[in-house]
Image (cartoon, rainbow, N blue to C red):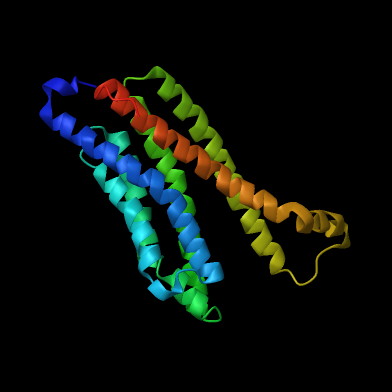
Amino acid sequence: MPDPASNPELLHSLGRMVRGLSALFWGLPMALIICVGTAGAGWFRIYGIVPPLATTGLLAFGLWQLDSFQKQERPWRSALDRAKIFALINLGLSPFTFWWNSDPGLIFYGVSMGVLALSAWFFIFTLNTVLLRLGAMLPDETLRHETRQFTSLNHTLLVSLLILMALQIALARVPRLPAQLGPILALWDRGGMWLLITLMLLPLAMTMAMIWKTKEVILDSVFGIKK
């Protein structure tokens, strides 16, 4: 990466990147808490669809702030564009968390919530790839090594989560299950939900850690500021 001190355009794009990474860092937990809380418990009902729109909009804003950095790098641009697509899908479907809580029996709302959950999964998956491509372009070998490790682990956990969720949905639609599956299903009933929560929260926490580390590298190595 060229020296930003001699390149005002690069310096400006890195400044936007720091803002974008900050928006992603704070937007991820806020979007999870507000969207899940709105859909499941009816939190913030007085504000209608505004809280889920605001938090998913913050994530989209964060990605767009990364848009001006290294436009000539095709792997980076491709990963970023994919993440932006899922960010827009999340933004467009986020009001259904409020509407589904108001009328959970409506099939259209239920299908929209399913599509939102799948899009959120793809968003986290592709965001990890974005961080991997970004780390490869920054002048910090430790960051590159850590992003490779964490991205690989996060992708494995996310794929495991998707497989388990698909199995749970498939088993719920089978009217009669073989008796041999009884002990396995009983074990799943006791601890399956905690396993799903762990597989959901652990990649989120590691993604946030990578975002924060990347922002620190930019501030410290490029701008000479340590946060």
Which residue lies at the image location 40% right of the left edge and 47% below the top edge?
26
Residue 110 visible from this viewpoint: yes
Report the side of 114 relative to 64 (left or right): right
Front residue of 5/120: it is: 5
Front residue of 31/114: it is: 31
Which residue lies at the image location 35% right of the left edge and 68% below the top edge?
50
Front residue of 205/2: it is: 205
Quarter holding residue 156: top right
Image coordinates of residue 85 in percent, x first then y, are 34, 54
Image coordinates of residue 100 in percent, x first then y, are 49, 75
Q: Quadrant of the N terminus?
A: top left
121 to 156, vertically: above or below: below
Residue 71 visible from this viewpoint: no
Report the side of 34 relative to 22 (left or right): right
- Total numbered circles: 0
89 to 72, vertically: above or below: below
Which residue lies at the image location 51% right of the left edge and 32% below the top edge?
150
179 to 62, vertically: above or below: below
Image coordinates of residue 162 in percent, x first then y, are 58, 52
Image coordinates of residue 171 in percent, x first then y, are 71, 63
Which residue lies at the image location 56% right of the left edge and 68% below the top edge?
40
Q: Quadrant of the C terminus?
A: top left
Report the side of 223 relative to 96 (left or right): left
